[in-house]
Image (cartoon, rainbow, N blue to C red):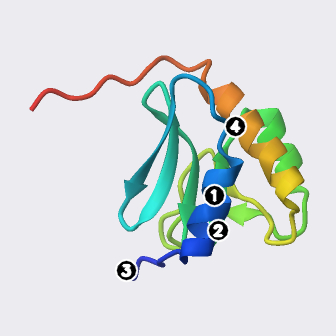
Amino acid sequence: MQMPKPTEADKQFFRSLIPDVPGVEVKPMFGNLGAFVNGNMFAGLFGSSVGVKLAADDLAELATFEGAGPFGPPERPMGGYLSLPSSVTAEQATRWVNKAQAYVATLPPKHKKKK
């Protein structure tokens, strides 16, 4: 499987979408980026595609938008995530990322595994 690489512009755009609130951090993941709250990923960058993890109702709503689709490798997309359509504005993308962060913040924190 070939991992798509985001451009610096893709990374900058992704970082601009992430809320600057306590408990939120952006980390590199396999050459891409992930945004986490309390250890759980709520948004990711896969090549130039931004994906979000949403509650079932919001996931169903986003799925109705033309261009929204599976997030991650085509042969193994990530469950519970959808890619934002490439046609979304920065304002629309920020709204979806904020919904994802708010939803994932309600999940139990993920603790680091001991080595």
Mark closest to the chain's N terminus, 2 or 3: 3
Q: Quadrant of the C terminus?
A: top left
Q: Secondary structure at mark 1?
A: helix
Q: Which amino acid type is marked by label 3?
A: Met
Q: Give the residue furthest to the bottom.
A: 2
Q: CA distance from mark 2 to mark 3?
A: 17 Å
Residue that appears at 50% across and 70% down = 73
Q: CA distance from mark 1 to mark 4?
A: 14 Å
The answer to whether residue 112 is above or below residue 68 is: above
Mark closest to the chain's N terminus, 1 or 3: 3
Q: How many numbered markers are drawn? A: 4
Q: Which amino acid type is marked by label 1?
A: Phe
Mark closest to the chain's N terminus, 4 or 3: 3
- How many neighbours does mark 4 have within 10 angstroms: few (below 14), some (14-19), or many (20 or more)? many
Q: Which residue in the structure is indicated by mark 1?
A: 14
Determine whether label 4 and label 3 are within 8 Å by CB: no
Q: CA distance from mark 1 to mark 3?
A: 23 Å
Q: Which residue in the structure is indicated by mark 3?
A: 1
Q: Between residue 1 and residue 105, name the one nearer to us.
A: 105
- How many neighbours does mark 2 have within 10 angstroms: few (below 14), some (14-19), or many (20 or more)? some
Q: Which residue in the structure is indicated by mark 4?
A: 100
Point out residue 35 in the picture as x, y percentages from the top left corner: 53, 44
The answer to whether residue 99 is above or below residue 12 is: above
Determine whether label 2 and label 3 are within 8 Å by CB: no
Q: Which amino acid type is marked by label 2?
A: Ser
Residue that appears at 56% across and 61% down = 45
Point out residue 17 in the picture as x, y percentages from the top left corner: 70, 49
Q: Which residue in the structure is indicated by mark 2?
A: 49
Mark closest to the chain's N terminus, 1 or 4: 1
Q: Secondary structure at mark 4?
A: helix
